[in-house]
Amino acid sequence: MLISTTSDNLSSGNLKAKENDQEKANKQEPIFKQDPLTGNPSIPHPAFDDQDRVFDDTGSLVSVTLDSLIELLIPSRNYSPEQSYIFAALLNIRIFISPPDLLQKILQLDRAERFERALIYISSSMDQVLNTHDNNYKRLVEICPNPTTLAQQMTLIELERLSMIGPDEIVYAAIDVDDAKKRFGNRMNNIRNYIDWSNRLTYLTATEILRCSKRQYRIFAIEYFIDVAKECINIGNFNSFMAIVAALSLPLIARLKKTWNRVEKSKLDILRHQFDPTANFVSYRSTLKAAIWRFNRAKNETDAIIIPFFGLLIKDLSLLHRQCAQLLPNGHINFKMFSQFGNEVSNFIKWKNRKCLFERDTRTLHQLLLSRTLSEKQLIKLSYNCEIAEQTSEKELYRRLKNDGNVQ
């Protein structure tokens, strides 16, 4: 009995000793191996989740999940994949993923890593920059006093971003929104970037107007952006036009009655007519139809430009796509709807690839793309500073905003 106990104690002690040795080995620096293809010493793999990657005692990869296998193909500042690993992975990975899908995944992971590094660098000083009152702030109307020039610069940005949207993304966007987000979310980045630009233009317009503390300056700013919107229509840039009108229609700007009473009514009526959503945007569709007629009869590629109101375009394509998905009573595919949907997407491709010869104004482009836009809460507070709250609900909201330390 004593011998058995002693034996058990020895076995237990040996087991603990092995565990301690294993812990020490794990804490040691990883072994630098020689790449069998190049003969050069390879940089060790970074530390990863044990559930995703399994290495043997020499540090060689034994098994790995598909996602981790792809991640290991991407070099970083502290890690470089071995040539032999790259060769083996690329030779066999096509069993589990097609080469185009593999390339897309690698590009997405690489962009995400670079974006994360840039974000860390920027965020270190962002709070200080945003909380500093900029006494030298230059308004857009000061940098670019000519509405035509500003409309042209907006058009350059619009076409640059539109050119990145492929027909496949349009199809994904035309599918039911929730379903598209689940299945194709990572394939719609260019559309998201384009929508972000439209939203930015709306809030930039509102910021420029509400930064004017004096009424006469606000009146001038509103009339200036009305002129810019009108020039956008003349160019055929309906998306920027809608973004500007959306800003002028925001409740925090629409409530400025004393300001709007001094705005030239004829200019405002033009915008209201074009933006009228009644009868499924019949006024806008009529103007767009005329622009398409000019586009199709233009002698030169640069003579006519069409940038459609993107939100309505996607809505129309979604309706068409639903009809494409419905079988006819005899069980056939409705190829007539296929053709109609294809024609609409083909038109969009022609519009987005149109060459634009407008001269680039660097200062104006910088202001449009990089200048600070205020948050909705900040804009509301500025709106009440411009014209005092009259209704009880407005007064209560203004009181809460004044007491909110996060709203500067």
Image (tube, grey):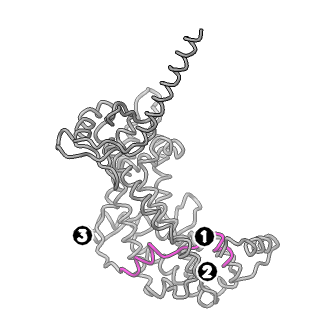
What's the CA distance linking mark 2 and mark 1?
12 Å
Percent position (x, y) of residue 397? 76, 70
Mark 2 or 1, which is nearer the eye? 1
Question: Residue visible at 58% across and 62% down?
Answer: 277
In this picture, which residue range is highlighted in magenta?
Answer: 362-382
Q: Disc 2 marks which residue?
A: 210
Q: Earlier in the sequence, mark 2 or mark 1?
A: 2
Magenta part, dominant SS:
helix
Q: Disc 1 marks which residue?
A: 375
Question: Residue visible at 39% across and 69% down?
Answer: 157
Is there CB contact under 8 Å for labels 1 and 3?
Answer: no
| Direction from residue 194 to residue 77 in the image, left or right | left
Reply above or below: 376 against 148.
above
Mark 1 or 3, which is nearer the eye? 1
Amino acid on which disc 3 is placed: Asn
Amino acid on which disc 1 is placed: Ser
